[in-house]
Image (tube, helix red, strand yellow):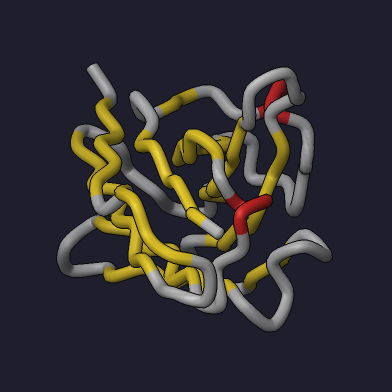
Amino acid sequence: QVQLVESGGGLVQAGGSLRLACAASRLTFSNYAMGWFRQAPGKERELVAAIRWSDGKTAYADAAKGRFTISRDYAKNTMYLQMNSLKPEDTAVYYCAADTSGLWVRASSNYYHYWGQGTQVTVSS
């Protein structure tokens, strides 16, 4: 059973920073794409950032460019999302997910086969 477990969410003031982590077990990353999604109340789940495990190639949504950084640690089988200059509109449940197709990069959540349980990020104004 593949497991993805997020951590690092919380409450932060606007302008602050948070670092999310996604630890994976029983998942051979190979050429998988790993992504961070978020879903705010009443909105669709959207891709924030993605990383190709094999070579570290990254992609970002426009809302994340210049503020968020996605990275991975081979040894720890863990993916991170460093979020800086947070805004109230970043408030959402953040999920990590894995697309095992080997294709790059697919923004729709429908293509991601494995999901974490989500972690709440709340940014106060």
Residue located 55% across and 35% down the image: 100
Q: Position of residue 52 (x, y in %)?
A: 57, 61
Q: How many marks?
A: 0
Q: Position of residue 95 (x, y in %)?
A: 47, 36
**Which of the pair 23/8 is nearer the observer?**
8
Residue located 52% across and 49% down the image: 34
Query: Residue 49's quadrant in the figure?
Result: bottom right
Is the residue 14 above or below the residue 104 in the image? Answer: below
Q: Position of residue 103 (x, y in %)?
A: 72, 46
Q: Can residue 27 be seen in this view?
A: yes
Residue located 45% across and 46% down the image: 122
**Which of the pair 11/31 is nearer the observer?**
11
Q: Identify the image quadrant of the N terminus.
A: top left
Residue furthest to the right? 62
Q: Identify the image quadrant of the C terminus.
A: bottom right
**Which of the pair 82/96 is nearer the observer?**
82
Query: Residue 47's quadrant in the figure?
Result: top right
Is the residue 21 above or below the residue 14 in the image? Answer: above
Judge left or right: residue 112 versus residue 26. Answer: right
Q: Is residue 55 visible?
A: no
Q: Position of residue 89 (x, y in %)?
A: 67, 51
Judge left or right: residue 23 versus residue 55. Answer: left
Judge left or right: residue 73 versus residue 55. Answer: left
